[in-house]
Image (cartoon, rainbow, N blue to C red):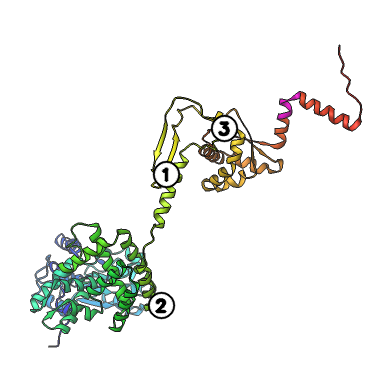
Amino acid sequence: MSYVALYREWRPQKFSDIVGQEHISRTLQNAIKTNRTAHAYLFCGPRGTGKTTTAKVLAKTLNCLDGPKVEPCNQCVNCKRVTEGNSMDVMEIDAASNRGIDEIRDLREKVKFAPSEGKYRIYIIDEVHMLTTEAFNALLKTLEEPPAHVIFILATTEPHKIPLTILSRCQRFDFRRIGIGDIINRLRTVVEDLGVTADNEALGLIARTAEGGMRDALSVLDQCISFGGKTVTVQDVESVLGTVNAAFLLQMTECFINSDVTAGLKLVDELVRQGKDVRQFAKDLTEHFRNLLLIEVCKDVEDLVPVSIETLKLMQKQAAGLSRKRIVSLIEVFTSTEREMKWTSQPRLIFELAVIKSGEKEPAEDYNDLVNRVTRLEGLLAQTQFVPSASKAPPPAKTGKPIERVKDRTGLGEEVVRKEQNEPGENTCDSVDAETVKKCWQEILDRIKKVRMSARAFLIEGHPVEVKNGSLILSFPPEYGFHKEKVEQQENKNAIEQVVKEVTGAKLKLKCKFTNELSKDTAAANPSKGGDSLVEKAISLFGGEVIEMKD
Protein backbone atom coordinates (compact mmCIF):
# COMPACT_ATOMS: atom_id res chain seq x y z
CA MET A 1 0.00 0.00 0.00
CA SER A 2 1.30 3.44 -0.88
CA TYR A 3 2.19 5.98 1.79
CA VAL A 4 -0.70 8.03 3.22
CA ALA A 5 -0.04 11.62 4.25
CA LEU A 6 -0.31 12.38 7.95
CA TYR A 7 -3.27 14.74 7.59
CA ARG A 8 -5.21 11.93 5.87
CA GLU A 9 -4.05 9.19 8.19
CA TRP A 10 -4.90 11.23 11.28
CA ARG A 11 -8.20 12.63 10.03
CA PRO A 12 -10.73 12.37 12.92
CA GLN A 13 -13.26 9.56 12.51
CA LYS A 14 -15.68 10.61 15.26
CA PHE A 15 -16.87 13.81 16.91
CA SER A 16 -14.72 13.37 20.02
CA ASP A 17 -11.56 13.37 17.87
CA ILE A 18 -12.30 16.72 16.23
CA VAL A 19 -10.02 19.33 17.83
CA GLY A 20 -11.02 22.90 18.59
CA GLN A 21 -14.63 22.71 17.33
CA GLU A 22 -16.42 21.42 20.42
CA HIS A 23 -19.25 23.94 20.02
CA ILE A 24 -20.16 22.45 16.62
CA SER A 25 -19.69 18.79 17.61
CA ARG A 26 -21.93 19.21 20.66
CA THR A 27 -24.69 20.95 18.69
CA LEU A 28 -24.75 18.25 16.00
CA GLN A 29 -24.71 15.44 18.54
CA ASN A 30 -27.63 16.97 20.46
CA ALA A 31 -29.56 17.41 17.20
CA ILE A 32 -29.06 13.72 16.38
CA LYS A 33 -30.01 12.67 19.91
CA THR A 34 -33.27 14.66 19.86
CA ASN A 35 -34.10 13.83 16.21
CA ARG A 36 -33.81 17.48 15.12
CA THR A 37 -31.52 16.96 12.15
CA ALA A 38 -31.83 19.76 9.59
CA HIS A 39 -32.13 19.22 5.84
CA ALA A 40 -29.28 21.65 4.98
CA TYR A 41 -26.12 22.71 6.78
CA LEU A 42 -23.51 25.31 5.93
CA PHE A 43 -20.01 24.76 7.33
CA CYS A 44 -17.80 27.83 6.90
CA GLY A 45 -14.41 28.80 8.27
CA PRO A 46 -10.66 28.97 7.50
CA ARG A 47 -8.89 26.16 5.70
CA GLY A 48 -7.85 23.07 7.64
CA THR A 49 -10.23 23.59 10.56
CA GLY A 50 -12.34 20.46 10.05
CA LYS A 51 -15.28 21.38 7.82
CA THR A 52 -15.14 18.37 5.46
CA THR A 53 -14.09 16.08 8.31
CA THR A 54 -17.12 17.10 10.37
CA ALA A 55 -19.37 16.60 7.34
CA LYS A 56 -18.10 13.02 6.88
CA VAL A 57 -18.44 12.20 10.58
CA LEU A 58 -22.01 13.54 10.51
CA ALA A 59 -22.77 11.44 7.42
CA LYS A 60 -21.37 8.29 9.09
CA THR A 61 -23.34 8.97 12.26
CA LEU A 62 -26.63 9.37 10.39
CA ASN A 63 -26.17 6.27 8.19
CA CYS A 64 -24.51 4.01 10.78
CA LEU A 65 -26.22 0.61 10.94
CA ASP A 66 -26.12 0.80 14.75
CA GLY A 67 -27.53 4.31 14.78
CA PRO A 68 -28.27 6.96 14.45
CA LYS A 69 -26.18 7.55 17.58
CA VAL A 70 -24.13 10.50 18.81
CA GLU A 71 -20.96 8.74 17.58
CA PRO A 72 -20.44 6.45 14.56
CA CYS A 73 -19.30 2.90 15.29
CA ASN A 74 -16.69 2.98 12.47
CA GLN A 75 -17.06 -0.82 12.29
CA CYS A 76 -20.17 -1.37 10.17
CA VAL A 77 -20.18 -1.53 6.38
CA ASN A 78 -21.72 1.93 5.97
CA CYS A 79 -19.16 3.62 8.23
CA LYS A 80 -16.25 1.93 6.49
CA ARG A 81 -17.52 2.88 3.04
CA VAL A 82 -17.92 6.53 4.05
CA THR A 83 -14.39 6.49 5.50
CA GLU A 84 -12.99 4.97 2.30
CA GLY A 85 -15.00 7.37 0.13
CA ASN A 86 -17.00 4.79 -1.86
CA SER A 87 -20.41 5.00 -0.22
CA MET A 88 -23.38 4.97 -2.57
CA ASP A 89 -25.38 7.28 -0.31
CA VAL A 90 -22.74 9.88 0.59
CA MET A 91 -21.68 11.93 -2.42
CA GLU A 92 -18.84 14.45 -2.26
CA ILE A 93 -19.03 17.13 -4.94
CA ASP A 94 -16.22 19.59 -5.66
CA ALA A 95 -18.00 22.81 -6.62
CA ALA A 96 -14.77 24.27 -7.99
CA SER A 97 -14.81 21.78 -10.89
CA ASN A 98 -18.57 21.11 -11.01
CA ARG A 99 -19.87 24.65 -10.83
CA GLY A 100 -22.21 24.89 -13.78
CA ILE A 101 -25.96 24.66 -14.09
CA ASP A 102 -25.79 21.27 -15.89
CA GLU A 103 -24.17 19.58 -12.89
CA ILE A 104 -26.82 21.02 -10.55
CA ARG A 105 -29.61 19.86 -12.86
CA ASP A 106 -28.14 16.37 -12.80
CA LEU A 107 -28.05 16.55 -9.00
CA ARG A 108 -31.71 17.58 -8.90
CA GLU A 109 -32.65 14.51 -10.88
CA LYS A 110 -30.69 12.13 -8.63
CA VAL A 111 -32.02 13.40 -5.29
CA LYS A 112 -35.38 11.80 -6.10
CA PHE A 113 -33.96 8.30 -5.71
CA ALA A 114 -34.14 6.64 -2.30
CA PRO A 115 -30.91 5.72 -0.46
CA SER A 116 -29.58 2.26 -1.29
CA GLU A 117 -27.71 1.41 1.92
CA GLY A 118 -28.42 3.83 4.73
CA LYS A 119 -31.23 6.03 5.96
CA TYR A 120 -30.22 9.22 4.14
CA ARG A 121 -28.70 10.36 0.87
CA ILE A 122 -26.17 12.98 1.91
CA TYR A 123 -24.59 15.48 -0.51
CA ILE A 124 -21.39 17.18 0.66
CA ILE A 125 -20.67 20.14 -1.64
CA ASP A 126 -17.17 21.47 -0.96
CA GLU A 127 -16.13 25.05 -1.90
CA VAL A 128 -19.78 25.79 -2.62
CA HIS A 129 -19.05 29.51 -3.16
CA MET A 130 -17.53 28.55 -6.55
CA LEU A 131 -20.94 27.73 -8.03
CA THR A 132 -22.23 30.11 -10.67
CA THR A 133 -25.25 32.32 -10.10
CA GLU A 134 -27.33 30.16 -12.43
CA ALA A 135 -26.27 27.02 -10.53
CA PHE A 136 -27.28 28.59 -7.22
CA ASN A 137 -30.66 29.51 -8.67
CA ALA A 138 -31.16 25.96 -9.94
CA LEU A 139 -30.26 24.55 -6.50
CA LEU A 140 -32.46 26.97 -4.60
CA LYS A 141 -35.80 25.16 -4.66
CA THR A 142 -34.28 21.73 -4.11
CA LEU A 143 -32.28 23.05 -1.17
CA GLU A 144 -35.36 24.61 0.38
CA GLU A 145 -37.65 21.56 0.12
CA PRO A 146 -35.58 18.43 -0.56
CA PRO A 147 -37.03 14.93 -0.22
CA ALA A 148 -37.20 13.63 3.35
CA HIS A 149 -34.28 11.28 2.78
CA VAL A 150 -31.85 13.97 1.48
CA ILE A 151 -29.46 16.13 3.54
CA PHE A 152 -27.20 18.81 2.05
CA ILE A 153 -23.93 19.80 3.72
CA LEU A 154 -22.31 22.84 2.09
CA ALA A 155 -18.71 23.74 2.97
CA THR A 156 -16.90 26.98 2.12
CA THR A 157 -14.06 29.25 3.19
CA GLU A 158 -15.81 32.35 1.80
CA PRO A 159 -19.42 32.51 3.02
CA HIS A 160 -19.77 36.15 1.92
CA LYS A 161 -19.82 34.97 -1.70
CA ILE A 162 -22.88 32.78 -1.17
CA PRO A 163 -26.27 34.35 -2.05
CA LEU A 164 -28.45 35.29 0.89
CA THR A 165 -31.25 33.13 -0.49
CA ILE A 166 -29.01 30.09 0.01
CA LEU A 167 -27.74 31.20 3.42
CA SER A 168 -31.26 31.66 4.75
CA ARG A 169 -32.13 28.03 3.94
CA CYS A 170 -29.21 26.48 5.86
CA GLN A 171 -28.15 26.04 9.43
CA ARG A 172 -24.83 27.87 9.58
CA PHE A 173 -21.86 26.68 11.64
CA ASP A 174 -18.74 28.84 11.83
CA PHE A 175 -15.52 26.90 12.38
CA ARG A 176 -12.87 28.69 14.45
CA ARG A 177 -9.14 28.72 14.01
CA ILE A 178 -7.68 26.02 16.22
CA GLY A 179 -5.65 27.27 19.18
CA ILE A 180 -1.89 26.83 19.29
CA GLY A 181 -2.13 24.74 22.45
CA ASP A 182 -4.64 22.33 20.87
CA ILE A 183 -2.46 21.96 17.78
CA ILE A 184 0.65 21.25 19.87
CA ASN A 185 -1.21 18.59 21.87
CA ARG A 186 -2.42 16.92 18.69
CA LEU A 187 1.07 17.00 17.15
CA ARG A 188 2.49 15.55 20.35
CA THR A 189 0.03 12.65 20.10
CA VAL A 190 1.04 12.03 16.49
CA VAL A 191 4.82 12.03 17.08
CA GLU A 192 4.49 9.77 20.11
CA ASP A 193 2.45 7.30 18.09
CA LEU A 194 5.04 7.39 15.30
CA GLY A 195 7.95 7.03 17.72
CA VAL A 196 9.45 10.38 16.70
CA THR A 197 11.24 12.69 19.14
CA ALA A 198 10.31 16.36 18.88
CA ASP A 199 10.94 19.18 21.37
CA ASN A 200 8.22 21.60 22.42
CA GLU A 201 9.89 24.56 20.72
CA ALA A 202 9.81 22.76 17.36
CA LEU A 203 6.14 21.81 17.76
CA GLY A 204 5.34 25.37 18.87
CA LEU A 205 6.96 26.79 15.76
CA ILE A 206 4.96 24.39 13.57
CA ALA A 207 1.73 25.32 15.38
CA ARG A 208 2.33 29.08 14.98
CA THR A 209 3.15 28.63 11.30
CA ALA A 210 -0.10 26.72 10.71
CA GLU A 211 -2.13 29.82 11.74
CA GLY A 212 -4.99 27.81 13.21
CA GLY A 213 -5.18 25.06 10.56
CA MET A 214 -4.64 21.48 11.75
CA ARG A 215 -4.13 20.16 8.22
CA ASP A 216 -1.32 22.67 7.61
CA ALA A 217 0.33 21.70 10.90
CA LEU A 218 0.25 17.98 10.08
CA SER A 219 1.59 18.65 6.59
CA VAL A 220 4.56 20.62 7.97
CA LEU A 221 5.21 17.92 10.59
CA ASP A 222 5.13 15.29 7.86
CA GLN A 223 7.73 17.25 5.90
CA CYS A 224 9.92 17.80 8.98
CA ILE A 225 9.89 14.07 9.79
CA SER A 226 11.02 13.36 6.24
CA PHE A 227 13.81 15.91 6.70
CA GLY A 228 15.01 14.99 10.19
CA GLY A 229 14.08 11.34 10.49
CA LYS A 230 13.24 10.12 13.99
CA THR A 231 14.23 13.42 15.62
CA VAL A 232 12.63 16.76 14.82
CA THR A 233 14.44 19.83 16.14
CA VAL A 234 13.65 23.51 15.87
CA GLN A 235 16.55 23.85 13.40
CA ASP A 236 14.89 21.23 11.18
CA VAL A 237 11.62 23.14 11.25
CA GLU A 238 13.40 26.42 10.44
CA SER A 239 15.18 24.77 7.50
CA VAL A 240 11.93 23.35 6.14
CA LEU A 241 9.92 26.56 6.60
CA GLY A 242 12.69 28.99 5.64
CA THR A 243 12.33 30.91 8.90
CA VAL A 244 15.28 32.33 10.84
CA ASN A 245 16.36 31.06 14.22
CA ALA A 246 15.91 32.92 17.47
CA ALA A 247 19.58 33.98 17.52
CA PHE A 248 19.08 36.10 14.39
CA LEU A 249 16.03 37.78 15.92
CA LEU A 250 17.87 38.49 19.17
CA GLN A 251 20.88 39.90 17.32
CA MET A 252 18.74 42.20 15.20
CA THR A 253 16.94 43.45 18.31
CA GLU A 254 20.29 44.18 19.96
CA CYS A 255 21.20 46.30 16.94
CA PHE A 256 18.06 48.37 17.48
CA ILE A 257 18.75 48.71 21.22
CA ASN A 258 22.31 49.89 20.55
CA SER A 259 21.25 52.02 17.54
CA ASP A 260 23.81 50.12 15.43
CA VAL A 261 22.46 50.42 11.89
CA THR A 262 25.64 49.02 10.31
CA ALA A 263 25.43 45.75 12.26
CA GLY A 264 21.74 45.47 11.36
CA LEU A 265 22.44 45.82 7.63
CA LYS A 266 25.22 43.22 7.88
CA LEU A 267 22.74 40.79 9.43
CA VAL A 268 20.35 41.38 6.53
CA ASP A 269 23.17 40.67 4.07
CA GLU A 270 24.07 37.45 5.91
CA LEU A 271 20.43 36.44 5.88
CA VAL A 272 20.19 36.90 2.11
CA ARG A 273 23.44 34.98 1.55
CA GLN A 274 21.94 32.02 3.41
CA GLY A 275 19.03 32.04 0.99
CA LYS A 276 16.42 33.16 3.53
CA ASP A 277 13.35 35.12 2.50
CA VAL A 278 13.36 38.68 3.84
CA ARG A 279 9.55 38.69 3.76
CA GLN A 280 9.50 35.77 6.17
CA PHE A 281 12.16 37.47 8.30
CA ALA A 282 9.98 40.60 8.56
CA LYS A 283 7.07 38.43 9.67
CA ASP A 284 9.25 36.60 12.24
CA LEU A 285 10.65 39.89 13.52
CA THR A 286 7.15 41.26 14.02
CA GLU A 287 6.23 38.14 15.99
CA HIS A 288 9.41 38.55 18.07
CA PHE A 289 8.52 42.14 18.97
CA ARG A 290 5.01 41.03 19.80
CA ASN A 291 6.50 38.55 22.29
CA LEU A 292 8.71 41.30 23.74
CA LEU A 293 5.62 43.45 24.23
CA LEU A 294 3.87 40.63 26.08
CA ILE A 295 6.94 40.18 28.29
CA GLU A 296 7.03 43.92 29.03
CA VAL A 297 3.29 44.14 29.80
CA CYS A 298 2.55 40.81 31.52
CA LYS A 299 4.19 39.18 34.51
CA ASP A 300 3.73 35.47 33.73
CA VAL A 301 4.36 34.86 30.04
CA GLU A 302 5.60 31.28 29.98
CA ASP A 303 2.32 30.14 28.41
CA LEU A 304 2.04 33.15 26.10
CA VAL A 305 5.54 33.01 24.59
CA PRO A 306 6.33 29.46 23.36
CA VAL A 307 10.14 29.58 23.50
CA SER A 308 12.79 27.82 25.53
CA ILE A 309 13.71 29.02 29.02
CA GLU A 310 17.12 30.27 27.84
CA THR A 311 15.59 32.25 24.98
CA LEU A 312 12.92 33.64 27.31
CA LYS A 313 15.56 35.00 29.69
CA LEU A 314 17.35 36.76 26.84
CA MET A 315 14.05 38.22 25.61
CA GLN A 316 13.23 39.49 29.11
CA LYS A 317 16.58 41.28 29.16
CA GLN A 318 15.86 42.88 25.77
CA ALA A 319 12.35 43.92 26.85
CA ALA A 320 13.91 45.72 29.81
CA GLY A 321 16.22 47.60 27.42
CA LEU A 322 13.33 48.81 25.27
CA SER A 323 10.47 50.99 26.40
CA ARG A 324 6.92 49.91 25.72
CA LYS A 325 6.50 52.82 23.33
CA ARG A 326 9.63 51.80 21.40
CA ILE A 327 8.44 48.20 21.05
CA VAL A 328 5.06 49.34 19.74
CA SER A 329 6.85 51.63 17.28
CA LEU A 330 8.99 48.70 16.01
CA ILE A 331 5.90 46.54 15.58
CA GLU A 332 4.23 49.29 13.53
CA VAL A 333 7.34 49.73 11.37
CA PHE A 334 7.75 46.08 10.47
CA THR A 335 4.03 45.44 10.08
CA SER A 336 3.94 48.23 7.51
CA THR A 337 7.13 46.88 5.92
CA GLU A 338 5.67 43.39 5.61
CA ARG A 339 2.62 44.86 3.88
CA GLU A 340 4.70 46.94 1.46
CA MET A 341 7.00 44.03 0.57
CA LYS A 342 4.07 42.08 -0.87
CA TRP A 343 3.76 44.54 -3.77
CA THR A 344 7.36 45.47 -4.52
CA SER A 345 9.96 43.93 -6.80
CA GLN A 346 12.75 44.88 -4.35
CA PRO A 347 11.75 43.50 -0.95
CA ARG A 348 15.33 43.62 0.36
CA LEU A 349 15.50 47.39 -0.18
CA ILE A 350 12.22 47.95 1.66
CA PHE A 351 13.43 45.80 4.54
CA GLU A 352 16.78 47.59 4.75
CA LEU A 353 15.00 50.95 4.91
CA ALA A 354 12.96 49.62 7.82
CA VAL A 355 16.15 48.48 9.58
CA ILE A 356 17.73 51.93 9.11
CA LYS A 357 14.61 53.64 10.42
CA SER A 358 14.36 51.32 13.43
CA GLY A 359 18.06 51.61 14.25
CA GLU A 360 18.11 55.38 14.49
CA LYS A 361 18.49 56.89 17.93
CA GLU A 362 15.35 57.98 19.67
CA PRO A 363 14.87 61.75 19.74
CA ALA A 364 15.55 63.43 23.06
CA GLU A 365 12.00 64.67 23.22
CA ASP A 366 9.16 62.59 21.87
CA TYR A 367 6.98 64.65 19.57
CA ASN A 368 3.70 63.24 20.89
CA ASP A 369 4.73 63.96 24.47
CA LEU A 370 5.57 67.54 23.53
CA VAL A 371 2.20 68.00 21.83
CA ASN A 372 0.39 66.63 24.88
CA ARG A 373 2.28 68.93 27.22
CA VAL A 374 1.54 71.99 25.09
CA THR A 375 -2.13 71.00 24.96
CA ARG A 376 -2.25 70.70 28.75
CA LEU A 377 -0.60 74.11 29.08
CA GLU A 378 -3.11 75.72 26.73
CA GLY A 379 -5.97 74.17 28.67
CA LEU A 380 -4.58 75.49 31.93
CA LEU A 381 -4.00 78.98 30.54
CA ALA A 382 -7.54 79.02 29.17
CA GLN A 383 -8.81 78.71 32.76
CA THR A 384 -6.79 81.71 33.97
CA GLN A 385 -7.87 85.35 33.89
CA PHE A 386 -6.21 87.46 31.21
CA VAL A 387 -4.07 90.40 32.37
CA PRO A 388 -2.98 92.52 29.33
CA SER A 389 0.02 94.26 30.90
CA ALA A 390 1.18 95.41 34.28
CA SER A 391 1.22 99.09 33.24
CA LYS A 392 -2.18 99.50 31.60
CA ALA A 393 -4.34 96.92 33.28
CA PRO A 394 -6.57 98.38 36.02
CA PRO A 395 -5.79 97.10 39.49
CA PRO A 396 -7.98 94.21 40.60
CA ALA A 397 -10.69 94.91 43.09
CA LYS A 398 -9.75 93.98 46.62
CA THR A 399 -12.24 91.40 47.70
CA GLY A 400 -10.14 89.68 50.28
CA LYS A 401 -10.28 86.40 48.35
CA PRO A 402 -7.09 84.39 48.09
CA ILE A 403 -5.04 84.02 44.92
CA GLU A 404 -4.36 80.42 43.90
CA ARG A 405 -0.86 79.66 42.67
CA VAL A 406 -0.57 76.59 40.47
CA LYS A 407 3.00 75.26 40.30
CA ASP A 408 4.39 73.06 37.51
CA ARG A 409 1.08 71.45 36.61
CA THR A 410 2.10 71.51 32.98
CA GLY A 411 5.38 69.68 33.49
CA LEU A 412 7.31 72.62 32.03
CA GLY A 413 8.63 73.99 35.32
CA GLU A 414 6.55 77.18 35.03
CA GLU A 415 4.20 78.82 37.51
CA VAL A 416 0.72 80.00 36.60
CA VAL A 417 -1.23 82.45 38.75
CA ARG A 418 -4.95 82.03 38.66
CA LYS A 419 -7.54 84.13 40.47
CA GLU A 420 -10.31 82.44 42.31
CA GLN A 421 -13.35 82.03 40.13
CA ASN A 422 -16.16 84.46 40.77
CA GLU A 423 -19.15 83.45 42.76
CA PRO A 424 -22.33 82.83 40.75
CA GLY A 425 -23.88 86.05 39.64
CA GLU A 426 -20.65 88.07 39.83
CA ASN A 427 -18.59 89.33 36.90
CA THR A 428 -15.49 91.38 36.29
CA CYS A 429 -16.86 93.64 33.61
CA ASP A 430 -15.77 96.75 35.47
CA SER A 431 -12.13 95.74 35.20
CA VAL A 432 -12.22 95.53 31.40
CA ASP A 433 -12.67 98.50 29.09
CA ALA A 434 -12.88 98.90 25.33
CA GLU A 435 -9.14 99.54 24.99
CA THR A 436 -8.37 96.23 26.68
CA VAL A 437 -10.73 94.36 24.33
CA LYS A 438 -9.20 96.08 21.30
CA LYS A 439 -5.70 95.01 22.34
CA CYS A 440 -6.94 91.45 22.79
CA TRP A 441 -9.05 91.43 19.63
CA GLN A 442 -6.56 89.58 17.46
CA GLU A 443 -6.18 86.85 20.08
CA ILE A 444 -9.97 86.58 20.28
CA LEU A 445 -10.15 86.11 16.51
CA ASP A 446 -7.42 83.47 16.62
CA ARG A 447 -9.17 81.52 19.35
CA ILE A 448 -12.61 81.65 17.79
CA LYS A 449 -11.02 80.23 14.65
CA LYS A 450 -10.21 77.03 16.56
CA VAL A 451 -13.60 76.89 18.28
CA ARG A 452 -15.92 77.90 15.43
CA MET A 453 -14.37 78.72 12.08
CA SER A 454 -17.59 80.08 10.54
CA ALA A 455 -18.08 82.54 13.41
CA ARG A 456 -14.63 84.04 12.83
CA ALA A 457 -15.40 84.57 9.13
CA PHE A 458 -18.31 86.82 10.09
CA LEU A 459 -16.77 88.36 13.20
CA ILE A 460 -13.71 89.63 11.32
CA GLU A 461 -15.80 92.42 9.76
CA GLY A 462 -16.80 93.77 13.17
CA HIS A 463 -14.78 96.04 15.47
CA PRO A 464 -15.11 96.51 19.23
CA VAL A 465 -16.02 100.09 20.05
CA GLU A 466 -17.35 100.19 23.59
CA VAL A 467 -17.86 98.19 26.80
CA LYS A 468 -20.95 99.43 28.58
CA ASN A 469 -23.26 97.96 31.23
CA GLY A 470 -21.72 94.50 30.93
CA SER A 471 -22.01 94.47 27.13
CA LEU A 472 -19.41 94.54 24.39
CA ILE A 473 -20.59 96.75 21.50
CA LEU A 474 -19.38 95.67 18.05
CA SER A 475 -19.58 98.01 15.06
CA PHE A 476 -20.36 96.73 11.54
CA PRO A 477 -20.40 98.79 8.34
CA PRO A 478 -23.92 99.05 6.82
CA GLU A 479 -22.89 96.95 3.79
CA TYR A 480 -22.04 93.98 6.08
CA GLY A 481 -25.53 93.36 7.35
CA PHE A 482 -25.28 89.67 6.53
CA HIS A 483 -22.20 89.33 8.72
CA LYS A 484 -23.90 91.17 11.59
CA GLU A 485 -26.92 88.90 11.34
CA LYS A 486 -24.76 85.75 11.42
CA VAL A 487 -22.78 86.95 14.45
CA GLU A 488 -26.08 87.57 16.28
CA GLN A 489 -27.18 83.95 15.73
CA GLN A 490 -27.32 82.24 19.11
CA GLU A 491 -24.73 79.50 18.48
CA ASN A 492 -22.18 81.95 17.07
CA LYS A 493 -22.95 84.51 19.76
CA ASN A 494 -22.46 81.98 22.58
CA ALA A 495 -19.13 80.83 21.15
CA ILE A 496 -17.81 84.41 20.81
CA GLU A 497 -18.92 85.37 24.34
CA GLN A 498 -17.17 82.28 25.74
CA VAL A 499 -13.92 83.12 23.95
CA VAL A 500 -14.10 86.77 25.11
CA LYS A 501 -14.51 85.50 28.66
CA GLU A 502 -11.52 83.16 28.33
CA VAL A 503 -9.27 85.90 26.92
CA THR A 504 -10.31 88.93 29.00
CA GLY A 505 -11.65 87.21 32.09
CA ALA A 506 -14.85 89.27 31.88
CA LYS A 507 -18.30 87.91 31.19
CA LEU A 508 -19.62 90.29 28.53
CA LYS A 509 -22.81 90.16 26.50
CA LEU A 510 -22.36 90.71 22.79
CA LYS A 511 -24.30 93.47 21.02
CA CYS A 512 -23.94 94.32 17.34
CA LYS A 513 -24.77 97.68 15.75
CA PHE A 514 -24.20 99.40 12.44
CA THR A 515 -21.76 102.30 12.30
CA ASN A 516 -24.47 104.84 11.43
CA GLU A 517 -26.56 103.64 14.39
CA LEU A 518 -23.65 104.39 16.69
CA SER A 519 -23.43 107.93 15.22
CA LYS A 520 -27.14 108.54 15.89
CA ASP A 521 -26.81 107.20 19.42
CA THR A 522 -23.90 109.54 20.04
CA ALA A 523 -25.85 112.49 18.72
CA ALA A 524 -28.88 111.57 20.82
CA ALA A 525 -26.72 111.24 23.91
CA ASN A 526 -25.19 114.70 23.27
CA PRO A 527 -28.01 116.88 21.82
CA SER A 528 -26.34 120.20 22.54
CA LYS A 529 -23.18 119.13 20.90
CA GLY A 530 -25.15 117.75 17.99
CA GLY A 531 -27.04 121.06 17.68
CA ASP A 532 -23.90 123.16 17.85
CA SER A 533 -22.26 121.16 15.11
CA LEU A 534 -25.35 121.64 12.91
CA VAL A 535 -25.26 125.43 13.39
CA GLU A 536 -21.58 125.48 12.62
CA LYS A 537 -22.18 123.62 9.35
CA ALA A 538 -24.94 126.12 8.42
CA ILE A 539 -22.65 129.07 9.05
CA SER A 540 -19.89 127.53 6.98
CA LEU A 541 -22.31 127.00 4.06
CA PHE A 542 -24.37 130.19 4.12
CA GLY A 543 -22.32 132.60 6.19
CA GLY A 544 -23.77 134.93 8.82
CA GLU A 545 -23.51 135.20 12.53
CA VAL A 546 -25.20 133.67 15.53
CA ILE A 547 -27.55 135.94 17.47
CA GLU A 548 -28.58 134.84 20.89
CA MET A 549 -32.24 135.63 21.65
CA LYS A 550 -33.32 136.28 25.23
CA ASP A 551 -36.78 136.86 26.60
Residue 33 shown in magenta: no
Magenta stretch: give its range. Answer: 521-527
Magenta stretch: dominant secondary structure: helix
Asked if one can make out residue 162 in the rendered structure from this viewpoint, the answer is no
Residue denoted by label 1? 414
Determine whether 468 is above or below 184 in the image: above
Q: Position of residue 10 (x, y in %)?
A: 14, 76
Q: How many marks?
A: 3
Q: Please tell me how crowded label 3 is: few (under 14), some (14-19), or many (20+) other residues with Cα within 10 Å.
A: many
Residue at image position (29%, 75%) is 281
Q: Please tell me how crowded label 2 is: few (under 14), some (14-19), or many (20+) other residues with Cα within 10 Å.
A: few
**Amino acid identity at mark 3:** Val
Q: What is the CA distance from the residue labelled 2 to the residue labelled 3?
A: 65 Å
Q: Position of residue 199 (x, y in %)?
A: 13, 73
Q: Position of residue 86 (x, y in %)?
A: 17, 81
Which is more foreground, mark 3 or mark 1? 1
Using the rendered view, name the quadrant where residue 128 is placed.
bottom left
Residue denoted by label 2? 344
